[in-house]
Image (cartoon, rainbow, N blue to C red):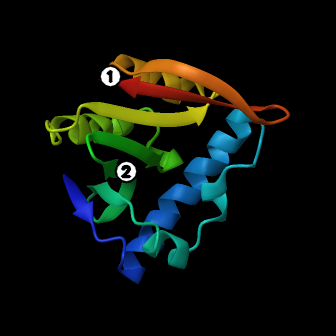
Amino acid sequence: MITKLPIEQKEVADEVLTVQLPAYRIEAAIIESDAIPALRDTVDSLMGCGEIFYGLRDEEALIGAISFKIEEDTLDIHRLVIHPDHFRKGIGRKLVKYVLEHHPEIRKFIVATGSKNTPALQLYASEGFVAVRAFEVMPGLSITELEKN
């Protein structure tokens, strides 16, 4: 079941990190760069990030999470993380669909991911996101921005 995660609580932030760090290590390997800021997150940085988090649990353990910020009529997905033990089970899709379906007031959804992160790009495309631009943030590391109206 997908539930809202009170990220301001230390125990919750710690639990999110146990999913986030291994997930982003896999993404770092895919995009051939460890320049992902979320790899340097701490419990304190998560607690103070100001994002809204939802998570999916398997029995009692957190296995996936999505976070976002809403500004006016735009919802910006900041992170979608699935524990590597649970890749390819549709968890990312469930979390994205949940956010899309539970925010009918939103006119535009945006997200950015590594341009070499084919699994993420395919997931977002299958949910109606369209790539709007790609840019190089440093030599060898390109980011693709996607949106859905």
- Choose between 18 and 146: the one closer to the eye: 146
Name the residue: 29% across, 71% down.
6
Name the residue: 49% across, 58% down.
19
Q: Is residue 28 visible?
A: yes
In the rendered image of this protein, does residue 37 appear above or below residue 11?
above
Give the class, few, some or many, for how many residues have Cα within 10 Å of label 1's Cα (few <14, many ≥20): few
Residue kind at label 2, given as amino acid type: Phe
Name the residue: 31% across, 50% down.
70
**Residue position marked by numbered label 1 in the rendering:** 127
In the rendered image of this protein, does residue 83 appear above or below residue 137?
below
Question: Where does the image place residue 62, in percent across and percent down from the top left?
Answer: 36, 60
Residue kind at label 1, given as amino acid type: Glu
In the rendered image of this protein, does residue 133 appear above or below residue 52?
above
- Choose between 111 and 53: the one closer to the eye: 111
Q: Is residue 89 visible?
A: no
Q: Residue furthest bottom?
A: 10
Determine the CA span between mark 2 and mark 1. Answer: 16 Å
Name the residue: 14% across, 36% down.
104
- Earlier in the chain: of badge 2 and badge 1, it is 2
Q: Secondary structure at mark 2?
A: strand
Q: Residue furthest right?
A: 139
**Residue position marked by numbered label 2 in the rendering:** 68
- Choose between 115 and 132: the one closer to the eye: 132
Which is closer to the viewer, label 2 or label 1? 2
Question: Where does the image place residue 48, in percent across and percent down from the top left?
Answer: 46, 74
